[in-house]
Image (cartoon, helix red, strand yellow):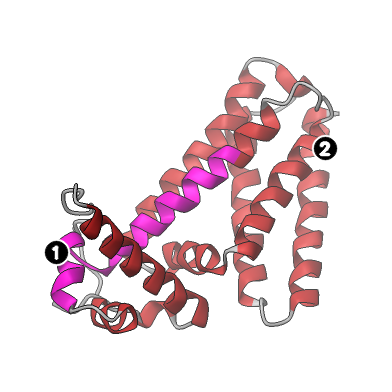
């Protein structure tokens, strides 16, 4: 099977979680190898064979735990989602932060630093834009992020007014995602990447200020 081909239905779920420590360690080796490949670039070209070679394990070991390369990527995306959730909820649950500009900037900057510190997250997140098998994962992440914001505004928090909270929240998430992808593509030019991201923050603030000021 050509893992790079478009497929209507692909099993993304990892096989049954192993109980033995050795098996758990083997999974970690496979994931770490995939992250290294992602950080080197050419994410679209990564296959289970390349992962096996990088991890120095038989390709059968990869298939023992993952049905395909997309399942490996999904495991990394789940790690990314867990850490982004912690950042988002950590900021929004802080009672000392009452200015929406501080909370929005804190969330976006926290996510930006996460991707900068872990380049494989940026690479695999970009894959959700280019790989049909992973688009649904990104759509679900966007929906969850937007719902966190929209639910606050439906409750009247942050002084939200004059707009559809669901639509505004979705637009914020989409602007952030687009900025993150551009910044990742410019990662070899850090100053340029930072400028693009700073510009996106200005766009976000100007877009949302009419609804929260």
Q: Residue at x 76, y 23 (%)?
A: 158
Q: Taking 76 as reference, is 152 above or below it? A: above
Q: Residue at x 19, y 51 (%)?
A: 20
**Occupied quadrant, residue 106:** top right
Which SS does the magenta portion mostly show? helix
Mark 1: few, some, or many residues within 10 Å (few <14, many ≥20)? some
Q: Position of residue 187 (x, y in %)?
A: 66, 76
Residue 97 visible, this orientation: yes
Q: Residue at x 42, y 44 (%)?
A: 140
Q: Taking 32 as reference, is 175 above or below it? A: above
Q: Position of residue 145 (x, y in %)?
A: 55, 39
Q: Earlier in the sequence, mark 2 or mark 1?
A: 1
- Bounds of the magenta span? 59-86
Check residue 183 for magenta coloring: no
Q: Secondary structure at mark 2?
A: helix
Whole-angstrom CA distance, mark 2 to mark 1, is 47 Å
Q: Taking 192 as reference, is 196 above or below it? A: above
Q: Residue at x 82, y 37 (%)?
A: 102
Query: Which of 9 and 97 lies nearest the eye of the viewer?
Result: 97
Q: Position of residue 34 (x, y in %)?
A: 38, 72
Side (left or right) of 16 relative to 104: left
> Which label sits on residue 101?
2
Q: Secondary structure at mark 1?
A: helix
Mark 2: few, some, or many residues within 10 Å (few <14, many ≥20)? some
Check residue 77 for magenta coloring: yes
Mark 1, residue position: 64
Query: Which of 151 and 171 lies nearest the eye of the viewer?
Result: 151
């Amino acid at each position: 099977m050509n893992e790079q081909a478009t497929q209507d239905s692909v099993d993304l779920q990892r096989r049954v979680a192993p109980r033995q420590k050795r098996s758990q360690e083997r999974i970690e080796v496979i994931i770490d190898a995939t992250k290294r490949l992602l950080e080197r670039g050419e994410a679209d070209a990564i296959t289970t064979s390349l992962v096996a070679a990088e991890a120095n394990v038989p390709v059968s070991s990869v298939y023992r735990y993952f049905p395909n390369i997309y399942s490996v990527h999904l495991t990394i995306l789940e790690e990314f989602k867990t850490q982004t959730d912690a950042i988002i909820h950590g900021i929004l649950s802080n009672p000392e932060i009452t200015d929406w500009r501080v909370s929005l900037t804190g969330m976006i900057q926290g996510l930006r630093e996460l991707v900068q510190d872990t380049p494989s997250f940026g690479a695999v997140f970009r894959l959700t834009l280019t790989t049909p098998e992973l688009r649904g994962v990104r759509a679900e992440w966007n929906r969850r992020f937007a719902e966190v914001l929209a639910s606050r505004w439906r409750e009247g928090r942050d002084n939200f007014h004059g707009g559809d909270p669901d639509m505004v929240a979705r637009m914020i998430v989409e602007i952030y995602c687009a900025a993150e992808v551009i910044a990742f593509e410019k990662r070899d030019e850090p100053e340029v990447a930072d400028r693009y991201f700073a510009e996106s923050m200005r766009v976000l603030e100007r877009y949302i200020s009419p609804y929260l000021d």
